[in-house]
Amino acid sequence: MLDKRPLLRAGALCVIALSLAACTAEEEKGGRGAPEVGYVVARIEAVPVTTSLGGRTVAFETSEVRPQVTGLIRRRLFTEGGFVRAGQPLYQIDPSLYQASVDQAAANLASARASAQAAEERARRLAPLAKMQAVAEQDYTDALAEARMARAAIAQNSAALETARINLRFATITAPISGRIGRSLATPGALVSASQATPLATIQQTDPMYVDMQQSSAELTTLRQAIESGGVTAGSASVRLRLEDGSAYGPVGTVQFSEVTVNEATGTVTLRARFPNPRGVLLPGMFVTALFDQAVNPAAILLPQAAVQRDFDGSAFVYLVGKDNKAARRKIVADRTSGANWVVTDGLKPGDRVITQGIGNLRQGAPIRPVPASKAQRVGAPKGGDAPAKGK
C-alpha cells in the first residue's frame, strides 16, 4: 500500500509557504513590513565657532622689591606670603649714615644762607655809595656778584639736603604695589646695595589675573578671511576657563588684545584675556584651557551625533527620508562638534528630514516608515520568538 504521509507533509509545507509569501506581499504592499525610523528636520541656526587654546596664568602686576641705597638690613617688617599694600614698609636699613648726611647738608645750607645774607647786605650798602662815586664802581660790581653766588650756594645746598633726605627715606624699603608678597631673599644683618642683581622679594597682584594663550597664525589668518568674506561673523570677547583638573572656572573673562607680531620659533600669536580672581583660585604660572567664541557661523545646521556616520575615508554621511518614504544617503561636511551635536556646514538644506533613530541596518533606497524622533517608537516582539500562550 502506498504511504501518502510524505505527500501530505509536502503539500502542507507548500500551503504554508504560499500563505507566508502572500502575507509578506500584502505587508509590503501596505507598508507594514518597512522598518520604523525617527527623523529630525534640518534648520538653519547661528552656531558659534568655539576655539580651545592652552594658556598660562600671569599676574596682573609684578614688582621686584629692590634696595635703592646701600646698608645693613636691621628688620623685616612683613609676613612672607601675606598681602601687602603699596607704600607699606617692608625692610628697615640702618639709617645712621643717611641721617648724618641729612644733618651735614642742613648745616651747609644754614651756612650758605648766612653768607648770602652778608653778601646781600654789603651790596645793598654799596649801592648808594656807588651812585655818589664814593666807592669804586668795580667794588660795587664785585659785591653784586658775591650776593648772586651766595644765592646760588643756597640752591646747591638745598638740593644736597633734599638728596640726603631722599636717601634717608630709602633706608625704609616700602612696597611699590599692592599684592601678595613671596618669600624674603634677605634676612636681617644682610648687606644690600642699590646695584645688586637679586631682589629682596617679589610682589604679585593676582586679582584680576591675565591668561596668555597661543594661537596659530594660520588659524587667525583663516578666521580673518572667513569674516571678511561674510562666511562667519565676529564672535564674543568673553572667555571661559577650564582648570588643570578639568573643572570649570566660574568667573568669565574678556579678551584684552592680540599681539601684532608672530613668534618666529612657534608660528603663534599671543592672545591675552583678563579674569577676575576674587578668591585667589588662579595662581601665576598655572596651565589652563581657554574656551571662547571667536566667530559665529550664521548658516550652520546642528545634527545629533547619532545621525552622522563615517565612510572608510573619513567622510561624513547621513540618511534622509527620501521620495516615497525610502532611505536616501547624503554626503555632508561636518568637521566639528558643538556640545552633543555635529555642526554641518555643507550637504544639507533647511527642511531635509534626517534620520537619527533606527539607522543601524539602513541602505540606499530601502523602504522606511518615518516618524518624528521625539515620538515614542513602537517596539515589536523579538523575531523568532513565540507568543505567550493564553492563560499563562
Image (tube, rainbow, N blue to C red):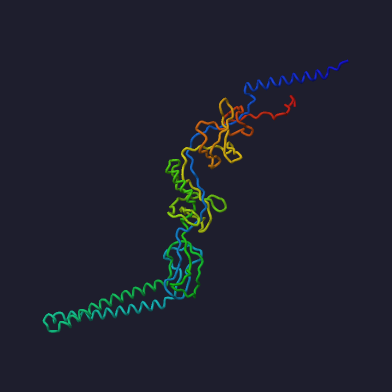
- For this rendering, which residue is in front, 217 or 26? 217
Question: Does residue 6 appear left or right of residue 385 in this picture?
Answer: right
Q: Residue furthest bottom?
A: 135
Q: Residue furthest top?
A: 1
Is 29 above or below relative to 350?
A: above
Q: Residue furthest left?
A: 132
- For this rendering, which residue is in front, 191 or 138? 138
Picture coordinates of residue 319 (x, y %)? 58, 33
Marker count (numbered) = 0
Query: Toward which corner of the image does residue 114 lie, by quadrant?
Result: bottom left
Question: Does residue 129 appear left or right of residue 274 in this picture?
Answer: left
For the question of whether residue 373 can be seen, the reply is no
Q: Quadrant of the N terminus?
A: top right
Picture coordinates of residue 392 (x, y %)? 75, 27
Q: Residue furthest front?
A: 313
For the question of whether residue 72 can be seen, the reply is yes
Query: Toward which corner of the image does residue 135 lie, by quadrant?
Result: bottom left
Is 138 above or below relative to 314?
A: below
Picture coordinates of residue 387 (x, y %)? 72, 26
Image point 50% across, 47% down: which residue? 51
Is 101 above or below relative to 322?
A: below
Picture coordinates of residue 175 (x, y %)? 44, 66
Is 376 above or below relative to 29?
A: below
